[in-house]
Amino acid sequence: MAHILWVGAGGFVGSVARYLLVNLAQSTWPNSFPIGTLLVNATGCLAIGSLSTLLENQPVLSSEVRSFLFIGILGSFTTFSAFGHETVTLLRHAGIGTAVANVSANILLSIGGVLLGRAAAQLAE
């Protein structure tokens, strides 16, 4: 139960941070390009890359704090950071083929899911 509470608390922090950063970016650079999302994805990936590397061989944080940081804050700030981290892990441990398969499947299934969901919703109207 403690892990769930830590993840939830981190989720609150990460989602509010995402909301604030996206709004700040979009109001600073107003155009049709989703600069806020790009900024969130890039900073989230930078954060998970540096934190995971720093903490990889040094278990200085409890599993609850790690859950708070990685799943909670970064997971709600951007799921793209998890995707990036998992892809790099696959590249390091399972090879380039598995990493490319992960990237391809995520992109195709995600964009395909949006298109399929939009088509289903339009049919339901």
Image (cartoon, rainbow, N blue to C red):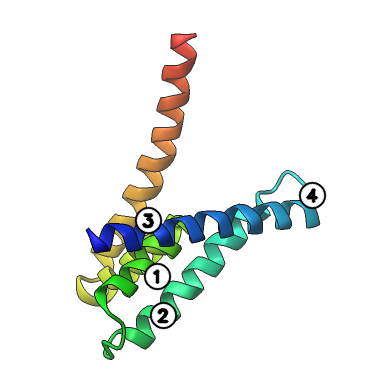
SS of the residue at dot 4? Answer: loop
Identify the residue shown where x is 33% and y is 85%.
55
- Point out the tag, 4 or 2, that comes first from the N-terminus: 4
Please tell me whether mark 4 or mark 3 is closer to you in this view: 3
Can you see residue 29?
no
Residue behind mark 1:
69
For the residues bearing labels 2 and 1, Cβ distance under 8 angstroms: yes
Amino acid on which the number 3 mark rests in the picture: Gly
The answer to whether residue 23 is above or below residue 57 is above
Q: Secondary structure at mark 3?
A: helix
Q: Are marks 4 and 1 in contact (CB under 8 Å)?
A: no
Q: Residues within 10 Å of mark 3 (few under 14, many from 20)?
A: some
Distance in Å between CA atoms under marks 4 and 1: 31 Å
Distance in Å between CA atoms under marks 4 and 2 = 31 Å
Q: Between marks 3 and 1, how big is the CA–CA gap?
A: 11 Å
Q: Nearer the viewer, mark 3 or mark 1?
A: 3
**N-term mark: 3 or 2:** 3
Determine which of the numbered discs, if any, sits on residue 8 in the image: 3
Q: Position of residue 2 (x, y in %)?
A: 25, 63
Q: Is residue 20 left or right of residue 77?
A: right
Q: Give 75 or 35, whichever is nearer the viewer.
A: 75
- The residue under the point 21% across, 75% down is 93
Name which residue type carries label 1. Answer: Leu
How packed mark 1 is, by other alpha carbons closer than 10 Å (few <14, some 14-19, many 20 or more), is: many
- Whole-angstrom CA distance, mark 2 to mark 1, is 9 Å
At 60% from the left edge and 52% from the top edge, which residue is drawn?
A: 19
Residue drawn where x is 30% and y is 88% of the image: 60
Element marked by disc 2: helix
User: In the rendered image, which residue does mark 2 sit on?
Assistant: 51
Tag on residue 30? 4
Residue 65, position as x, y percentages in the image: 33, 74
